[in-house]
Image (cartoon, helix red, strand yellow):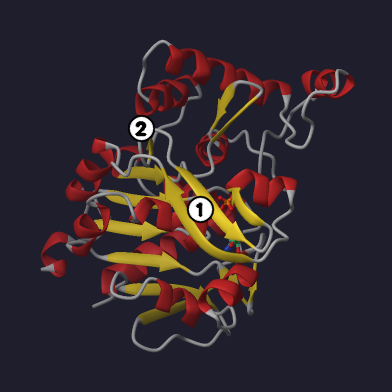
Amino acid sequence: MIGATRGPGFRRVVALSGGVGGAKLVDGLAAVLPAEALTVVVNTGDDFVHWGLRICPDLDTVMYTLAGLAHPVQGWGLADESFAAFAMVERLGGPAWFRLGDHDLGVHLVRTQRLAAGAALSAVTAELCTSLGIGPRILPMCELPRATMLDTADGTLDFQEWLVRRRGAPAVNRVWSTGPSAACPAVLDAIADSDLIVIGPSNPYVSIDPILNLDGVRAALAAKPVVAVSPIVGGKAVKGPLAGMIEQLAGRAASPAAIAAHYRGLLAGLVIERGDEAPAGVASLPASTVMTTRDDRARLAADVLAFAEVVP
Ligand code: GDP
């Protein structure tokens, strides 16, 4: 059946994404697909309320990346940013562990105001994307807050407490979610209408599982070809705490095989870094998966789509 629904130049691709790694691949997909062919489903498990504002780090990273506004190196925030408001918060003794830039703040202000007026997160996200001139559709995984929680050696922490405030240091025993488990209805519709699902090289535990674990998502994906890109390269995460999490949560070394095992039963294929050992039991494509430039992103996206054409 797979062959019947796919063809050259997939007409409807759904990408599942977290922030840093996922956003870069999404940017590549946006470069090689027509805007109307791409829907991006973004993790909102990292969302939190800070300074009274609703902050959606992964949605913002994907949005800023597709708008060409993202900071090129740091993996969050905007390229041309100032921190005057943050400096004043610090001077006033306010919470200063999470840096928010002035332009970034403008997004959080508008989002918070629209949500307070009763708009759904998906509608607000669509408005922000239109204002920023973004073509592909970006969907939050769910409309209502659903926070990712981590049971760690230092107790239970929410995601930002763990990653930003504690710098991802406490060992993780379990990752879970709190809040309603309903997927955004548009997410289920987009998956049903798609002919290919791409899982970006995002952190499986804290970026992709929160999406997969929503009601109906795994069942919807079971009918679709799914290809993923490994976030583990040369035995390490390209950025962030994933390698340690694999050791702590899966009890094995970080590798493409560990990623394949994590997504077992879901994947038609896994794109891995050239030279890394191919996982058993799933088709794999060696490619250059480290995306340093925008050309790297587009080239990897093209490789992923070409691979998806031929995986069984
Ligand atoms: P987060 O929500 O900001 O943590 O972002 P993601 O979960 O989307 O991305 C984090 C993961 O992206 C990490 O595990 C990294 O190893 C991976 N990553 C970041 N950049 C790259 C890259 O250029 N290539 C690959 N293959 N993985 C990457």
State the image coordinates of residue 133 (x, y, percent, origin top left): 47, 25
Residue picked out by circle 1: 22
Instruction: Decide which of 225, 166 is in the foreground and name it.
Output: 166
Q: Is the CB of the residue bearing disc 1 within 8 angstroms of ligand 1? A: yes
Instruction: Decide which of 235, 9 is in the foreground and name it.
Output: 235
| Earlier-in-chain disc, 2 versus 1 | 1
Q: Helix, strand, or loop for circle 1?
A: helix
Residue 6 in view here:
yes
Locate ligand 1 by image quadrant.
bottom right
Task: Report the disc number at residue 143.
Answer: 2
Dot 1 amino acid type: Gly
Q: Residue at the spot x=35%, y=32% of the render? A: 143
Q: Residue at the spot x=21%, y=64% of the render? A: 222
Label 1 crowd bin: few (<14), some (14–19), many (20+), radius 10 Å: many
State the image coordinates of residue 225 (x, y, percent, origin top left): 25, 65
Instruction: Decide which of 37, 103 is in the foreground and name it.
Output: 103
Dot 2 amino acid type: Glu
Left or right, 79 with reference to 301:
right
Left or right, 184 with reference to 303:
left
Q: Residue at the spot x=41%, y=10% of the render? A: 117
